[in-house]
Image (cartoon, coloured by chain):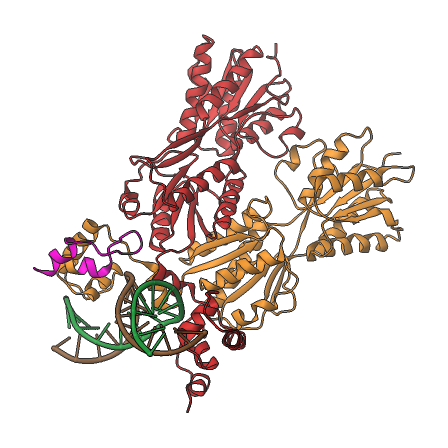
Chain colours: A orange, B red, C green, D brown
Amino acid sequence: MPDTARAAAGPTPERRYGNRPTMKDVAARAGVGLKTVSRVVNGEAGVSPDTERRVQESITALGFRRNDSARILRKGRTASIGLVLEDLADPFYAPLSRAVEEVARAHGALLINGSSAEDPAREQELVLALCARRVDGLVIVPASGDHRYLEPEIAAGVATVFVDRPPGHIEADQVLADSFAGARDGVAHLIAHGHRRIGFIGDRPGIHTAHERQRGYLAAMEAAQLPVHDGWVAAGTTDPERVRADAERMLSGPDGVTAFFAGNNRVTVTLVRVLAELDRPVALVGFDDFELADLLVPPVTVVAQDPAQLGRTAAGLLFRRLEGANDPPRRMTHPTRLIARGSGELPPAT
Amino acid sequence: MPDTARAAAGPTPERRYGNRPTMKDVAARAGVGLKTVSRVVNGEAGVSPDTERRVQESITALGFRRNDSARILRKGRTASIGLVLEDLADPFYAPLSRAVEEVARAHGALLINGSSAEDPAREQELVLALCARRVDGLVIVPASGDHRYLEPEIAAGVATVFVDRPPGHIEADQVLADSFAGARDGVAHLIAHGHRRIGFIGDRPGIHTAHERQRGYLAAMEAAQLPVHDGWVAAGTTDPERVRADAERMLSGPDGVTAFFAGNNRVTVTLVRVLAELDRPVALVGFDDFELADLLVPPVTVVAQDPAQLGRTAAGLLFRRLEGANDPPRRMTHPTRLIARGSGELPPAT
DNA sequence: GTGAAAGCGCTAACAC
DNA sequence: GTGTTAGCGCTTTCAC
């Protein structure tokens, strides 16, 4: 009985991957050696046209597809990178993720991604799972403040780039927006339009960007020699209930604030809702641009950053590393841009 | 020279994965057998506390992390699923993607995803790359109309679920929203508010959902015995310029439309912009809900579907298959929900 | 131009 | 409890 028949007939041995044919099967059916199949599959030279045809026929007939798991094991490169961020569905991170994907694609790599849900333990679990898969590199939007768990991985050669927020307690490439300057300029913009009592509502101050934006707010107030009352700064979750309660508190009383600076897009949206219910105009500048901001009434003035650009830069840096660049870790800071649309130019209510 | 020393010293052989230690290295350093290390790493029983401690120490010292590529090769399961959709960053698909991720996570699987950019060739390329990685299953939002290329993969046991749009020329599980009924009811809503000249602007009719929604529009008009002029139906890319041009054409002249039904969220948003520039009110109902729809002026009436729910259902179906369910492929249709907010209840301008 | 043999790092099966 | 062996499906090396 020739090999060809043996491969096709008989009691099929329990095979893995739902009984997929292997190169060996293809070789047997085509009556060639294993290596020849490998050559054809990988488009290597040194196969006669006739042999190649026979192998191709065998591949099609058997429905063969190369098993990249085995290939990866042998080659040591997975041609995949990992992306861990807070929430894939967040309108800020979705374009970042998409940009990373495009860069990966341009380099022939697949993207594995996961949402940390702002939970440090989950971030670590995801990152280490990706390392176990031997992704070639990682792009991380940190949820955790301590990344020493990554030291063995980085030492072992996993390229790592942090984006949007810096890593904790380790040195690594990072791509950030200038949160401090952005917030400072946004608040200065409100001050320039006559506001003296300005509230700041931000995300949890443990988050680097949130902290920086709060610093920016304080810097602008101080630069204008304006006092900041205790109740004017609120930081916590971006839960709408919390934001609403803080906003309403800041607005109450004769000394209520006449303007808000919102620390991120979720806070901004909640504030838009709160302010829409008031009978007096209250100014608003928000950090992060968002879709339809220009269609609201009044249109919302924002400090915009470009998430897709952050993602592109981070992924670019990552692939530079993968191609061998080994200069010291660098921090790249992207500027923000104030977009005046109306809500930030409202004068203080009298 | 004992094994321990041999592993640690001497001219390090060129190893892969950036010179990562293997179980063999861990075993040598701990002075135990390979299988014992495997047991400890995988939390299997049958290791004495003392041995376990030694192995753990060795793991930490060496910075060992199990190579899942090798594990996958051996076990035949990758504990990962693939998701291919149009655009990860689209506000409709991002929550779908996130929902699939959550279900995957609950089943201990990672998610590899890719954007097809509505390009059939790119969809196929991505899907086959995922199959080569031997993902356990696939969730696909089709860009292509012909999925026969998947036949060998499905035959080989790759579980596949289509979501948002049905597959072409193959049988497979599918999870859809009821586009036809949703559009029909949305248009009937406009008719109920007195409109007789209603324009439909949709996505390319080659897309299943776009086609169904157009059918729904026509069905509602016919049910009300309303004529549909040639110029009242426009289908094409969701490019804002195209949508704007079509809308302006439909609005012009004494017999211009008094209301629009928009085929998806991108069209809706462009129409909101166009209508905001007019000096007369024009009614609008859009397919797909979107953030801030309730804050626009007027608030936008929509036919809502729940993308996260679609994703959850699809992923749930996928894991049912992975757990062995082999009943015939099924189609699950989710109902849509009309949310009246104002723009769809405007009467026809006189 | 082609193929045989070794081995990537792990787990399964079985021995001790 | 612990270790040895074989082999997952591929690529690498080297011989023909």
What's the residue at 82%, 42% (across, down)?
A193
What's the residue at 24%, 53% (across, down)?
A64
Q: Position of residue A131 (x, y in %)?
A: 49, 64
In magenta stretch: residue B168: no
What's the residue at 62%, 30% (across, down)?
B293
Residue D16, above or below A286: below
Which quarter of the figure has residue A300?
A: top right
In magenta stretch: residue A25: yes
- Relative to residue A91, is residue A325 drawn left or right? left
Hey, which residue is sitting farthest top in the picture? B225
Over which residues does the magenta segment extend? A1-27
Which quarter of the figure has residue C8?
A: bottom left
Q: Position of residue A109 (x, y in %)?
A: 42, 57
| Of the pair A49 and B10, the residue shown nearer to us | B10
Residue B245, above or below B54: above
Residue A344 visible somewhere in the drawing? no
- Relative to residue A112, is residue A205 drawn left or right? right
Hey, which residue is sitting farthest left in the picture? A1
Q: Position of residue B141 (x, y in %)?
A: 42, 39
| Of the pair A286 and A241, the residue shown nearer to us | A241
- Relative to residue A273, is residue C8 drawn left or right? left
| Of the pair A72 and B256, the residue shown nearer to us | A72
Figure label count? 0
Residue A22, above or below B250: below
Q: Can you say which quadrant of the picture contains the N terminus of chain B? A: bottom left
Q: Position of residue B145 (x, y in %)?
A: 33, 36
Q: Can you say which quadrant of the picture contains the C terminus of chain B? A: top right
Hey, which residue is sitting farthest bottom in the picture? B1
